[in-house]
Image (cartoon, helix red, strand yellow):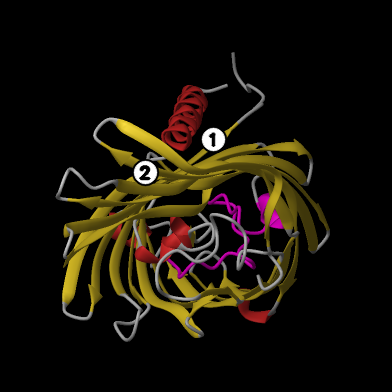
Amino acid sequence: MSRISKIVLSAVLAVLSGMSLHAQESAYGAFSPYSVYGIGDLTMQGGSFSRGMGGVGIATRYNRYLNMVNPAAVTARDTLSFMADMTLESQNKLFRQGDITSANNTFNISNMAVSFPIWRKSAFSVGLSSFSDVGYKFSHTDIDENGIWTSSAMGTGSIYQLTLGVGAQFGRLAVGAQGLYYFGSIEKASQRVNSNTTFRNFSNGYSMHLNGFSGKFGVQWDQPLSGGLRLTAGATYRLGTCLKGEVTDYNFATISSIRDTIGYNVTNGKQVRIADEIGVGVALRKGQNWMVEVNYLRSDWTGTGMDTATGFANIGTAKFSAAKSQSIRAGFEMIPNINDARYYLRRCTYRGGIYYDQAYYKLDGNTVGAIGVTFGVTLPVFRLYNGLSIGVDLGQKGSSTGNMTRERYAKFVIGFNLHDIWFRKIQFD
């Protein structure tokens, strides 16, 4: 094992420990008023290079980067190569509802993945990433004959997914499968406090500790065309699964130092479902010069039980209802001259993309959508296959009409793409 590989493995252990601690502490994985509902905001999957192309990856086959979006893509590699990818993400958001505005910033590890060969055209992968995030905090005051009341609500936590995958290639056909383990904690709390200490204050909330198993399958067909072009078609299917665990629903009334329990209920077992998801994509590539790709994903959440489940259903004045989600994503990348020995910038990879995501729920019967544009670049480091990827995602979610909130954001990602050769036979002593 080379020095680079040892550094990578050390980084993996550090990141896994950090993400586990993050999950236990229920810190802000992201911040959005829309994360009040269900299991929070779903995270766009994929590494930094995929995020720079609008989130595509179902049909991406390239030996330079580790693609976890499609389990079959892990076979696109050099035979003895060890690959790793780590992505950091900064989210900067501006919110507006009516004439009220606010802003928030977060910074977190988005995902970590490694892959290595098993035998000939087969390979193994392991990864840890965020699946959904809950993060919100807001308050307001009102006055009545009893004094000034301050009402506030706060939520934190994330659902993570641990991925173990394997893929194999048979001629032009590649197949792959991933085992998924979801785990995490979500805390949702609210309180109503009176400025007059002779009145009782009220607090209630939900504490959820959830987990579940699922699987994801993928295929890719790579077809050579004339003129050095290659057409790749891909498809993925993620199985739906139940999230189980413990959900605590509590309600307290407090005056001075005395706290009365109005309600306290703990439920164990199955809580809600994560919906299944199907995705298809097609990509056209010309050698190592350029690539374009289009993806479509669809998922039906209407039967997941989130409309009525304790801790997941209505919180606030807007009516929450589970719905069908879908995404349309398109992206491209280009390298001016991958073998240019004189000009460094001509060896860099430049990317761009657009996307439209329709959320897995509706508010007051209204669809919640997000639209954005992305840009990215990979800077080669040491050797060609090692790189530092930088990306930006500029977009908007929701609108400022009715009970909706307009959320504008600028997300920045930094990815470390590492590549090494293992088990290389020494030619000279």
Left or right: 303 as drawn, with respect to 113: right
Seen as rendered, the residue at the extreme right is 170
At horizontal 29% and vertical 67% (from top left) the residue drawn is 409
- Tag 1, which secondary structure? strand
Front in this rendered view, residue 81 or 277: 277
Q: Which residue is mark 1?
A: 420
Position of residue 59 measured from the top left corner of the image (x, y, whole percent): 64, 68
* Front tag of 2 and 1: 2
Q: Magenta part of the protein: which range?
A: 52-76
At horizontal 17% and vertical 43% (from top left) the residue drawn is 197
Front in this rendered view, residue 90 or 384: 90
Image height of 34 relative to 207, above or below:
below
Task: Find residue 25 and report its image quarter.
Answer: top left
At horizontal 41% and vertical 37% (from top left) the residue drawn is 260
Q: Which residue is mark 2?
A: 253
- Tag 2, which secondary structure? strand
- Work out how far the residue at label 2 is from the one at label 1, CA to CA, in angstroms: 60 Å
Amino acid tagged 1 = Asp
